[in-house]
Image (cartoon, rainbow, N blue to C red):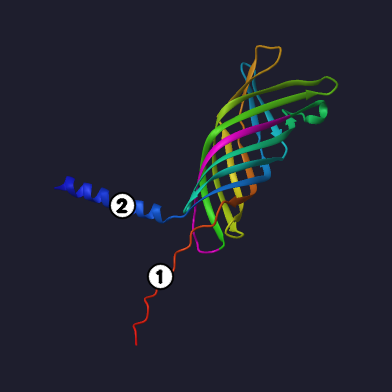
Amino acid sequence: MSKGISLVTAASLAFAIGLRISDAWAQYYIGAQAGWTGLPYQTDTIDGLGSVPTEFSAGYNVGVRGGYQLGSWRFEEEYSYRRNDAAEFGAGDSTNGLSGNRHTHSVMTNVLYDLITGWPITPHIGVGIGAMNVFDGLRVSGIGQVFNDSNWQFGYQAIAGLRYEINALFALDLDYRYLATTESTFRIPNTSLRYRTGANTNNFVASVTYRFGQPPTASPLSTPAPPPP
């Protein structure tokens, strides 16, 4: 008996979910984004030699994304690029003849949920996973580029922001995105040494999205014809 009740309950739940999904409107969308990127204090760990603290100046990010909105849910693919220049190496700084940068390309799959409030401004939260290509570069004054290496790492991000509905087709998003990777390993040229480092970034991003087609509107109820006199 309990098994039968469980099956009926599961079927009822599936039916209810199906109704909710069928009632939800869906749209494809594309968007462009740009903003500020902070790369917090990093530690480069050289195998066998210890750690070298590295500080980066504020940088920027740009990107594009496209996806599918189903009711309150958004499913999207995102490409973004970030760059931060090195400000200090260990106890020194970039003015002593060393300069460098860390920049990344990322391809992420994101899932976001809009918290519908009934107002033009809507909060949203989300998560993403994907891959990041992390580049490290180093220049020495009078010599030029002495190091430029990269590798792909697993990437993940957390998203929180606000969306302003400009009209039925355009929306403006203001997001905070924490985007990070697993630890990258680079080989130091002309040596057998390697160093490990991270790319944990704080990003404030503004984006404009364009949605293809307007959401469906409820059809008006037909009114019965008045009775004949």
Q: Amino acid at mark 1?
A: Leu
Q: Can the viewer see residue 40 in this picture?
A: no
Please give the count of numbered marks on the rendered protein. Answer: 2
- The quadrant of the rendering that contains the C terminus is bottom left
The answer to which image quadrant residue 43 occupies is top right
Can you tell which of label 2 and label 1 is closer to the viewer? 1
- 14 horizontally vs 86: left or right: left
Q: Residue at x 78, y 24 (%)?
A: 139
Kindly report the secondary structure that dominates the magenta region of the rendered protein.
Answer: strand
Give yes or no for residue 108 being in the magenta stretch.
yes
Decide: is 86 above or below 73: above
Q: Residue at x 58, y 35 (%)?
A: 107
Q: Report which residue position mark 2 lands on.
A: 15
Give yes or no for residue 103 being in the magenta stretch.
yes
Specify few, some or many for label 2: CA neighbours under 10 Å numbering under 14, 14-19, or 20 or more: few
Q: Amino acid at mark 2?
A: Phe
Decide: is 4 above or below 222: above
Q: CA distance from mark 2 to mark 1?
A: 25 Å
Q: Residue at x 62, y 16 (%)?
A: 48
Residue pushed farthest bottom? 229
